[in-house]
Image (cartoon, rainbow, N blue to C red):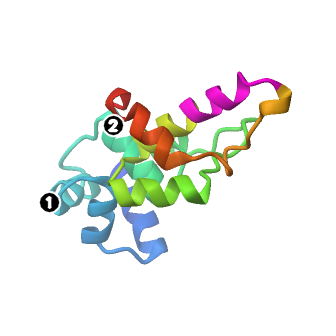
Amino acid sequence: MATVGERVKARRIELGLTQEKLAAQAKITKGFLSDVENGRRNVGADTLLELAGALSLSLDYLMTGEIAETSATPLEIPTALADLALKEGLTFRQTRQLLGMGQQIVAHRSNTDRVTSSAFDWPKFYASVKKFLK
C-alpha cells in the first residue's frame, strides 16, 4: 500500500509539476515536500489540505489511497473568487472558508434578493471579512 508521500509524488508527476511548483502552491518548502514524498516527515492537517487542493485530490484519497463514495457535489470555486485568491495570496483553506461565508450570505437572502456565488462581489466581500479568515 502506498504512503501519503508516494501518492503526493505520483500525482505531482502525473500533473507535470516540479517539487518547487507544488511546494509553492501548497505554501511549504521544497525540502519539506521532498521529505514528505520520501517518507521522512509526516504531514499536518493544514498541509494535507493545501496539498490536496494543489493536487486536485480529496483528503480521503490522499490519506488512504481510496476514493470515498460520497453524494457530495464537487467544490466549485467561482472564477472571480479564484482570481481574488490568487491576487491576495489566499490559501486553499482560506478560499474555501471565504466561499462558504459567501454562500451562507446568499442562502439567507430573500428569494427576490438572491445572488449566485458567481455574480457575488468577492473583492468587496473579502475586504469586509478578511480579518476573520484563518
Question: Magenta span has 63?
Answer: no
Span highlighted in magenta in the image? 101-110
Residue that numbered label 2 is attached to? 46
The picture quadrant where one finds residue 45 is: top left
In the rendered image, residue 103, in percent from the top left (x then y), is placed at: 64, 33
- Left or right of 61? Residue 17 is left
Disc 1 to disc 2: CB gap under 8 Å? no
Residue that numbered label 1 is attached to? 31
In the rendered image, residue 115, in percent from the top left (x then y), is placed at: 73, 40
User: Which amino acid is tagged 2?
Assistant: Asp
- Left or right of 13? Residue 70 is right
- Left or right of 113? Residue 8 is left
Secondary structure predominantly adopted by residues drawn in magenta: helix
Question: Magenta span has 105?
Answer: yes
The picture quadrant where one finds residue 79 is: bottom right
User: Vertical placement of 39 versus 10: above or below?
Assistant: above
Q: What element carries label 2?
A: helix
Q: Distance between the residues labelled 1 and 2?
A: 17 Å
